[in-house]
Structure formats: structure tokens, C-alpha cells
Amino acid sequence: MTYNLDELKKRSAVANTSHNIRNNLQPAPKHEKVPESSKNITDITRTHRTAYVIFFSLLLDLLAFTMILPLLPSLLEYYRKNDNQLYGYLANSIKQFQVWIGAPERFTSVLFGGALGSMFSFLQFLSSPIVGALSDYYGRKPLMLLCATGIAASYGIWAYSESFLLFVIARFVGGISKGNVSLCMAVITDVSNQQNRGKAMALVGIAFSLGFIAGPMIGAMFSRFSDKTGTLWFFAPAMFAMLLAVADILFLAVCMKETLPKEKRSNRIINSLSHAIDHISIRALFRFSAVENLSQKDVRSLRSLGVTYFLYLFLYSGLEFTVTFLMYHKFGYTSIDQAKVFLTTGVLMALLQGSVVRRLPDRLVKTSAVFGLYLIIPAFIIVGLAESSLMLYLGMILFAISTAFVVTCMTTITSKYGDFHQKGTVLGVFRSLGALARAVGPIVASVAFWGVGARVTYIAGGMLLLWPALMLQYLKL
């Protein structure tokens, strides 16, 4: 979310000045200090200490989470060659169809990778609202610790996943425990106000940027010094990820204070869970049913924004997920080579988000989102047509520029709808639509990659992205 901090400071200063004038008309009680306007503004806009705790917790979580990105193609190749149980059974089940469409056997790992990616995101889509509802009743800290424990357990299972079945179980446990991201947003909402929430949310964005810059590099370094011909060659990176997760648990246990006092919690757990259903029901999501007392015009605008966002992330997430397999199979990139690409795009996104996107005036937010949506079209087409590393990097740089603008700007547009007490619900539904899109996109793109190849998949995906771009451009807000 983007907030105009200078404007908020001006408004706070005017309000405080008026308050002081009224106070000066009455005799001030003895021994009572009249607060200074500048001090009040500082107190209002200062970022709460807990926001920094959340930043560090998220950073530890994302470093562990992103380590697997450059390792995933090699991991699935390992199971393709060494697992004759679940992987072999699934591969034999699709053998006839694979021969019929002429898909190379080595692309089977892309198909299974897409299935795992979609499973992980779908579990996150289901668990996030439920975890949020439980935290409304039990408090934020117990659920944060529970999620962190589940994430650590998933890395422990991965470390010993000699079979593909164990690796699937590890991803299942990790996906169902990934409600911690939405909980972090809830914690920041608890400890911030309208004046300083933008700064607190910016810390979350910085944590994501740093995680996606450093995490893949750490994973690639482990991969570089691993003997991939041996059994459990991924034990070291998995254990390192688990150590990061355990460090996160200890950090939260010691440093995080409960942000939802008992008097503000939900009185009945069934009420919280029933509200969470509105974030899981697909029909209710697209209709924004959880948001009440909005004008028909605003509801129509929100629904159009929701559809646009879903279509964008559905196409975007599928192509984003399969790009590691494209680099591995088409360009023969090692984990280090892939990490360099992630480093380049991550640094560029972080620079743009920190220097440009956060400072966009309101009048340019929609224009910037439309610009980003149009820019992603040539980005994916260039990646699909790329025959050299130079063209691949060009496409990925355009991809990074687009990514820096679209989600942040569309979230900012959406956050303008509803009263102050409704914004959390509006953004919750909006994020759930994004999670649903990420649950469907990877498997669809992976099936296309497996069936018709990378070139057709990326060119077709890029052209289809014209649809949400046109929708947003002509949407009347």
C-alpha cells in the first residue's frame, strides 16, 4: 500500500494546532505540560517496534523459502531418475498421453513441478483465512509460533526425503503452514494507524525483496558444492533452511509481544471461522460478499478490479513458476546461473519499489499499473523467443520492471474502497483472489510447457496478458 506521508503530516499538524489554540483559551492546570505539535506528529508517524520484529521474522522465513527455487529442477530430475515408486507410478500413468502429444520425457519434471507449486499455493489459499480466524480468537503470537513450527517441520521432512512421496509430504506440510504471511499483515494492522501503516507495510515489501535476492543465491551456493550423484545431496540446504526456521521460532518466542489484547478478540470462534469461509468460497470472493455497506458503483468497481487481478496473476504466476525449468532445460543453466537471474531481477525490483513506486502520487497509480500490465506482454514474449542469454536477460529485466509496479499499484487502488474499518476485509478478499490465481496458474502453465513447449506457452501467455491490461485501462474507478 502507498500512503502520502507528507500530506498526512500536514493534516496532523493542522489538527494539533487547532487543538492547542482551544487549550490556550482556558487556564492550563499547574504542573501540566502542553504537548508540542512536532512531538505528537512524531509519535503518530513512528513505526512500531513490532513491525521490525515482523520484518526480521519474515526475512528469516523467506530466506528459507526461496532457497529451493534454483534447486527445484535438479530435485525433480533426481526423483525422475531414482524414484520408482510414486514418481515412477505417476510417470507411467501419463506415458501413453505423453507419447500421443510428443512431449519429451525430461519435461515430465516440469509437469510434476507445476502440480507441486499449485498444491502449495492452494493449501496456502485455504489455510491463510482459517489461521487468521483462529488468531482473532486465540491471539496472534500462538498462531505465528504454530505456523513457524510447521514450516520448520516441512524442511526437516525435506532433508530426509529420499523418495518423491516424502518430498510431496514436505511441501504439503509447508503449504498448510504458510498462513504466517497473512498473520504478519494482521499484526502490522494491529500495531499501526493510518498515518504510519504505509511505512510498516514497506518493511514487508523490503523483506520480500531481500528474501528473493539472497535466498536463491544461498540455495545455489549449496547446490554448487553438492554431489548430485549421491543420495540426499539436498540434505545440507534443507537442514540450513530448517535452522533458519528454528531461529525464526526462537526469535518470535523471545521478541514478539501479543498484539491483539483479549478484550479485542472475537468472543466466539465459530463467528471468526464463518467469516473466514467468505475468503475461501470462490463465488463469494469474486462477488466481494464479505464487504458490506458499499455503494453499487464501488461494488462493481471492486469486482472488476478483482477479476483483472485474478486474470493477471493466473497468467503471470504460471509463467513465473516455469521460468526456472525453461532456464534449466533450454539454456542448461546451473543453480548458480539461475540465482544470478533472480539476483538481477530482485535488485531491480527492490530499487524501483524503494525509489519510484513508494513515491508515486495518487494520480499516477492507475497509469503505472496499466503501464506494468502492458510491459509484461513483451517481457514474456521475448523470454519465449529467446535463443541467447542476452535475450533472456532482456525479457527478465522487463519482467522485473513490470512486477515492481503492478501488484503494489493495484493493491493501492483497491485500498481506497470502503471505510477505515472495511479496508482490512477489502484487502483480505483481494489477497485471497491473488492466492487462488497462484494456486491455478502454475499447473496450467506447466501442462502447456509439457505439452506444447516453452515457446508457444510463453508467447500465448504474453498475448493473453493483453486482456487484463485492457480491462484495467478502460475501468472507470
Image (tube, rainbow, N blue to C red):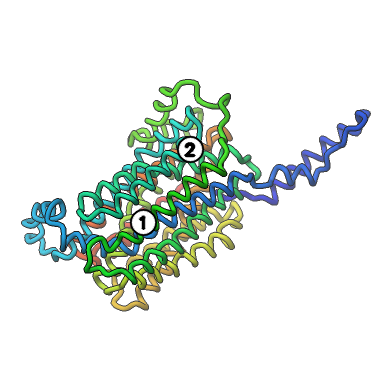
Eye-nearest disc, 1 or 2: 1
Residue at 44 percent across and 27 percent down: it is: 272
Q: Do callouts 1 and 2 mark residues in contact (Cβ within 8 Å)? A: no
Q: Which mark is residue 150?
A: none
Precedes in sequence: disc 1 or disc 2: 1
Q: Which residue is mark 1?
A: 239
Q: Give the image location of residue 414, x and y in percent.
A: 50, 44
Q: Secondary structure at mark 1?
A: helix
Q: Which residue is mark 2?
A: 426
Residue at 10 percent across and 64 percent down: it is: 102
Mark 2 surroundings: few (<14), some (14-19) or many (≥20) residues within 10 A: many
Above or below for 36 versus 117: above
Q: Give the image location of residue 253, x and y in percent.
A: 51, 41
Q: Which three-letter amino acid code belongs to the residue tagged 2?
A: Val
Which of 172 and 248 lies nearest the eye of the viewer? 248
Per the model, the C-alpha gap separating discs 1 and 2 is 39 Å
Is residue 378 among the parts visible in the rendering? no
**For residue 163, what is the image quadrant?**
bottom left
Residue at 44 percent across and 68 percent down: it is: 343
Which of 128 and 160 lies nearest the eye of the viewer? 160
Q: Which three-letter amino acid code belongs to the residue tagged 1?
A: Met
**For residue 358, what is the image quadrant?**
bottom right
Q: Give the image location of residue 112, x and y in percent.
A: 21, 55
